[in-house]
Image (tube, rainbow, N blue to C red):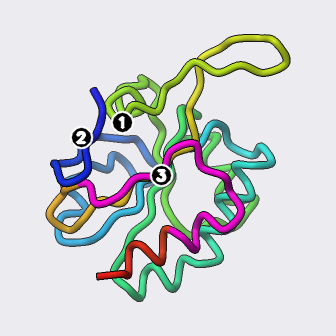
């Protein structure tokens, strides 16, 4: 299953340190749903910090941010605390959400093939429809590009 711009975003339930969170919880608000490979790795930390540093601007525009990886809630708590992240992180331990959004991909590094999360971001409108998506994200400038797209209307 994959997502299509203009269509309803795939529903989800994710565990967070505050309990379960669902797509319906964001009804009436714009949501930046971003998927990243692993807590506390260099690229993922840089991406999280860029969203953190822009978080007040996103919030002022009525936009929420939710980061997602397959790491545990306990790992997310350590990651959030260490880097003073101001938004929630969802744990997709079953892989259902990463599969639903089509971000669980075959990857290759140093000649080794494995499956992992392809860094991707989805902009979901207040009505639950997918407004934009970024796949194979390059971290530098990404949070600013998402903010620009989210506030363009």
Between 106 and 49, the one nearer to me in the picture: 106
**Residue 101 image label:** 1
Q: Residue at x 77, y 43 (%)?
A: 41
The answer to which of marks 2 and 1 sits earlier in the sequence is: 2
| Vertical placement of residue 70 versus 35, above or below | above
Residue holding disc 2:
10
Q: Is label 1 or label 3 in front?
A: 3
Q: Is residue 31 magenta?
A: no
What crowding class fits label 2: few (fewer than 14 Cα within 10 Å), some (14-19), or many (20 or more)? some
Q: Residue at x 64, y 21 (%)?
A: 107
Residues tagged 2 and 1 counted as in contact (Cβ below 8 A): yes
Residue holding disc 3:
134
The answer to which of marks 3 and 2 sits earlier in the sequence is: 2
The percent position of residue 22, horizontal first and vertical second, equals: 26, 49
Picture quadrant where residue 60 is located: bottom left
The percent position of residue 45, horizontal first and vertical second, equals: 73, 54
How far is disc 2 from disc 1 in space, using C-alphas? 7 Å
How far is disc 3 from disc 2 in space, using C-alphas? 16 Å
The percent position of residue 56, horizontal first and vertical second, equals: 52, 84
Between 20 and 59, the one nearer to me in the picture: 59
């Amino acid at each position: 299953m994959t997502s299509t711009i203009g269509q309803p975003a795939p529903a989800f339930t994710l565990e967070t340190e505050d309990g379960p969170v669902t797509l319906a919880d964001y009804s009436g608000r714009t949501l930046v749903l971003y998927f990243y490979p692993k807590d506390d790795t260099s690229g993922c930390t840089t991406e999280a910090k860029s969203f953190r540093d822009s978080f007040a601007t996103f919030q002022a525009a009525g936009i929420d941010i939710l980061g997602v990886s397959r790491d545990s809630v306990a790992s997310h708590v350590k990651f959030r605390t260490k880097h003073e992240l101001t938004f929630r992180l969802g744990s997709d331990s079953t892989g259902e959400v990463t599969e639903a959004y089509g971000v669980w991909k075959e990857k290759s590094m140093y000649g080794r093939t494995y499956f992992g999360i392809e860094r991707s971001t989805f902009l979901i409108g207040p009505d639950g429809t997918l407004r934009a998506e970024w796949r194979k994200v390059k971290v530098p400038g990404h949070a600013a590009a998402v903010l620009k797209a989210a506030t363009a209307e």
